Image: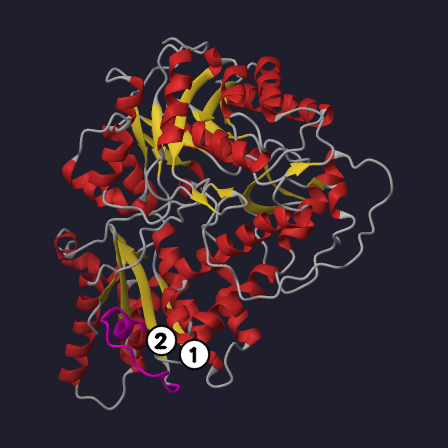
Amino acid sequence: MANRFQLPNLGIGLGLRTKHYSTILEHKPAVDWFEILSENYLRTEGRPLDFLDQIAESYPVVMHGVSLSIGSSDPLDWQYLRELKALRDRTKARWVSDHLCWTGVAGKNSHDLLPMPYTEEALAHVTERVCAVQDFLGAPLALENPSSYAEFAADTMREWEFLGRLAEQADCALLLDVNNVFVSSRNHGFDPLTYLNALPIERVVQFHVAGHTEHGTHIIDSHIGPVIDAVWQLLAAAHRRSSGVPVLLEWDAEIPSFEETHAEALRAREFIGAAG
Amino acid sequence: MKREATQDALGVHERASATPERAASAQRLAFGHAPTWTEGELGLREQQQWFLAIVSTPQDEPAPVDARSAPRLIAPSATLGSLERIEIYRRGYHARLIECLADDYPVLQHALGEEAFEALSRRYVARHPSHAPSLNYFGQHMAEFCRSERPVAEEPGFAADLAALEWAIVLSIHAPTAVAIGFEDLGQVPSERFPSARFRLNPSLQILRLRYPANAYLQAYRQGKPIAWPAARETNVAVYRTGRSVWRLELEPAMLTLVESLGSGATLETALAQLQASLHGESEQQLAEKIQHCFQHSVASGLFSGIFI
């Protein structure tokens, strides 16, 4: 309970993926916790929820969303938020997270995590919306730093400054994805440690690690393959600054067996210590 | 009338925060339309409208910004120009949505071939952009789209029927889960109450009236024995779920009559009378056997989830 929000250190978790449902339900492997993709269980009354209910009975879960669109200039989608809250209550999710991004505008959803302009206008806009969402949820929202491939010409600050100021002003939690820091540092040309050291670590309630794909001129946050050593080293650096934050592996393409995926997640112990 | 299990996907689109790694499209990338945005600084709303307008423009069409104006929106990096940076998002946008359609329509993709399916999907993405937070229903217009787009010259109706069948599978996955009634439940009903009994259909049940034998095609594909595009032949297919299993059941006309009668709220007595009236030219014994078979088979298949007496 070392973070500002007294949220628990759940240990080392895995992103729940359909490919692993049967293994999890049949063998009940020892996993500290699962992160679910919120939208996969919205707008359904059927089988996805059947699976999720069973898994949430046996494991702690955390909800990770991709359609909150907290940075959009469209109004907040209150129907979506009501559904999100209902899912949170149904699964007893320990917390709810999403990304510092926007996913659409004028009612259209790109289903992508689009980059924010880092301007004073955008900061004021997002701060107000994070406050509104937290009031509605009655709990802190954890915002994740995104991977990005483009920066707006109008930017007046770097992402870490924007995120840090947002967290302080809105009093929200942070989900620090060290792979995203690595990807964006290469795409935009900054020192990842500058980013890590600038964030208010007491607000970080969760770490993400993942694989990515090198394209020479840029890196894509593909969540393919094992985590590279440089990203593990960033996790170690961030973890040293914290008082113990849960770690989660995301693996979303060419997903291997449950055992292999879990083994990759557990490599985190080498970098943060067995206690997690 | 053997029901067939559908080895469908597990019913959710893995909509993660990852950027899809799809092979670069053979589509020509075109930019060139001069922007019509006003002079001066762009506010958040304008920035987002322009960004999404570029990202969602089909990849074979000119995006609404040119190389000279793009730096007003996006700064270049040390290795990529402004348009090239936006293009990463543009590629990802289309790849993600096309993958979603391929997840929902694997057999249609097989039937059309990957290239034709991708071309159809690109047009679909342009025509039916997502307005929902979830991708679960993104593919809902495909059957209708196949009818209007005619993705193939021959038998265009078959593609639409196949899409309708695959979409019914998706819908059954997301329909409420219900426990099917069985013969033991019927055994609880006093015999004198049977005529007035009414039945509730399984809430996931959809009955498709198809002009082509799309179910036979789908089954052959699933069994690894792909067949040629079939000629027109009317079939009725029930698609539904019991527990975690999705089923496809071809309904003979008699069984269709019975299920539809009971589904419309008719009592068992009325439904059986309607069924009897629809059967012609059979002996009394054949008639009785057929009616009994239809009723028992529809119960055994899990088409009903409740009985009211």
Task: Tell me the element at label 1.
Answer: helix
Residue at mark 1: B158
Residue at mark 2: B214
Coloring scheme used: secondary structure
Measure how far apart labels 2 and 1 are at the Cα level. 7 Å
Task: Report in which chain the residue with disc 2 lies.
Answer: B
In magenta, the rendered stretch is B218-232
Q: Residue at x 58, y 13 (%)?
A: A168
Image marks 2 and 1: residues in contact by CB distance under 8 Å = yes
Q: Residue at x 35, y 15 (%)?
A: A8
B293 and A155: which one is in front? A155
Where is residue B47, by image quadrant?
Answer: top right
Q: Residue at x 14, y 78 (%)?
A: B289
Q: Position of residue B307 (x, y in %)?
A: 25, 53
Q: Is residue B224 left or right of residue A7?
A: left
- N-terminal of the pair, mark 2 or mark 1, is 1
